[in-house]
Amino acid sequence: MEDKTLSKAMDIFSILMSGEEISKNRPGTSELYQTYYANAEVYELVTKLLARLNISVYEYNETLFVTAGEGNKVFGYTNDDLKRLLGLRRNRELYLVYFIIYQALLFFYTDSATYQVKEYVRMEELLQTVSEAAGQIVKESETFNQTSAEQEGFRSVALLWHELPLMISEDKDRNKASRGSRMGYVKLTMNLLQEEKLFISSEDRFYPTDRFRALAEGYFEDSKGRIYQLLAGGSTTGGEDHA
């Protein structure tokens, strides 16, 4: 392997690992983007390095993004990390945040081929979406007496949501995210997604970034929408084995 090839591969690798994107249309990274796809040796070396570190690379709108792979405790968050970051104590509180994140994803996607043409989501819309999904889970679990560990986990999160009041006095402050109401949890979740550069907000509207779209489409391609199947009852119909 030539030194030039190795140097280019390391340039690409170091930029991606620093949390930056490499874009065809971005000054300073356009050449690297072209090299990544035009030079097979560079492409192979970069993808091997990322794979060895359990890092996934996705593309959207001619831009490369990376994210920590499942179970990556070095470059990703553990459950305990996120609980400390968000000021949560119990696992099911954290799982409620995950549930809200997933509903935010489903607001724009149901699978990799069905992007819904929506430019943004409002806090109230997301709150309603989560309420409807949680209500459906509780209703189905009572109707069909589902007992799988996965379904029981979803039911526990849905029940926590229903235990919370819609709003409390702290929620009147648009900059505060309480942990004592449904609105507070939605605020807490959207604050996290903004910090991770997945959404940007303007006038109470939350717009998904290209990074969000890259990760969303990559998720559905990689996992075949596993959580969506569970929420839709796929795990109780004798289909795929549990992941």
Image (cartoon, helix red, strand yellow):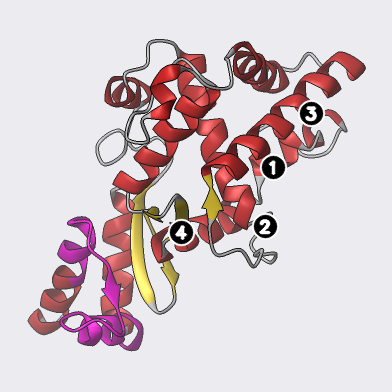
- Precedes in sequence: disc 3 or disc 1: 3
Residue ranking furthest to the right: 143
> Mark 4 packing: few (<14 Cα in 10 Å), some, or many (20+)?
some
Q: Quadrant of residue 217?
A: bottom right
Using the image as rendered, state which of residue 87 and residue 42 is in the foreground.
Answer: 87
Q: Nearer the viewer, residue 100 or 181?
A: 181
Residue 185 in picture, x, y percent from top left: 47, 27
Q: Is residue 229 above or below residue 179?
A: below
Asked if the residue at tag 2 contacts the one at tag 3, i.e. Cβ–Cβ closer than 8 Å, the answer is no
- Type of residue at label 1? Tyr
Which amino acid, mark 2? Asp
Q: Amino acid at mark 4?
A: Tyr
Query: Which residue does the numbered mark 4 point to in the structure image?
Result: 207
Name the N-terminal-most of marks 4 and 2: 2
Residue 40 falls in image quadrant: bottom left
* Residue designated by label 2: 111
Residue receiving disc 1:
228
SS for dot 2: loop
Q: CA distance from mark 3 to mark 1?
A: 13 Å
In the rendered image, the vertical position of residue 218 relative to residue 82, given as above or below? below
Are dots 4 and 3 in contact, CB under 8 Å? Answer: no
Which residues, given as a range, are shown in magenta?
Answer: 12-38
Mark carried by residue 136: 3
